[in-house]
Amino acid sequence: MRTKPSIFTIVLPMLALGFFLYASSSSAAEPAPKTLPKAVLELPVAKTGEMRTAVLAGGCFWCEEAAFEQLRGVSAVVAGYAGGTAATATYDSYHDSNHAEAVQITYDPAQVSYGELLRVLFTAGDPTTVNGQHPYYGRGYRMAIFYADADQKKAAEAYVQQISAAKIYAKPIAVTVEPMPEGFFAAEEYHQHYVARHPEQPYVRQWSRPKIALVRAAFPELIAPAVPAAGANGKPPAGK
């Protein structure tokens, strides 16, 4: 004899469906072309053999670090915090500060330009989202370009204006161009090269690896011949 379904067998599937629909709608980013226009304004020509750094924020620094590590001419990417003070530059305290999760990229301008790094930043995330990048929202996850000098500020502002004027997106560009009053602060060691060290971690599989693939598909000419090998697995920190 067929038994009467319980309230749980009716309600739980409905809740699951509702969550799926909500998550699907929330994760819908503003559509972007395969590659964005090249920057009209670049930094001054570098000296022979000169290495430069750029500090960019685009949501979770695990994802951003891995996206930029695969580019040619990039010799180091450090996950960290920018925009706030030294006192709040820790994973436990930055959320209540002006810090954003950011990456410091050391690169060879003879192989990859500052403008190309900005194109990758804008393509890897949604530049129209205010204070966040799916699936995390809040000021600490904003998309921002942190400048170290007047040339970087000028080039960054020019690119934001260039993309805004091109009307590529239906919504306004929300990327901010900001100073670093106290500089860039490296995050805790367990955050460094997190994706390479934990490729099968659930968050990495769902959010980081697709972003890496997106950048590779959009900028095949910028991808380095070899990608750093993955390290040992470990437990992820709380919060992701």
Image (spheres, rainbow, N blue to C red):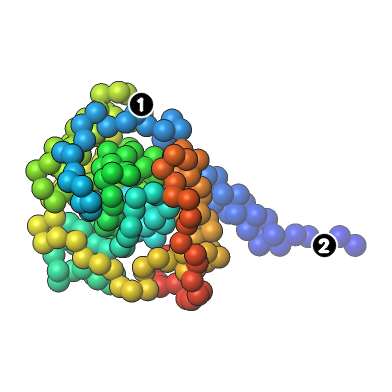
Which quadrant does the N terminus fall into? bottom right
Which residue is at 35% across, 26% downward? 168
Which residue is at 44% across, 46% downward? 223
238 to the left or right of 13 = left
Instruction: State which tag comes first along the sequence, 1 or 2.
Output: 2
Please tell me whether residue 52 is drawn above or below residue 160 in the rendered image. Answer: below
Name the amino acid, label 2. Answer: Thr
Q: In x, y percent, where is residue 12?
A: 63, 58
Q: In x, y percent, where is residue 25?
A: 49, 42
The image's mark for residue 168 is 1
- Residue hosting label 2: 3
- Label 1: state its secondary structure: loop
Residue 141, quarter of picture: bottom left
153 to the left or right of 159 = left
In the foreground, 227 or 32: 227
Q: Residues within 10 Å of mark 1 (few under 14, many from 20)?
A: some
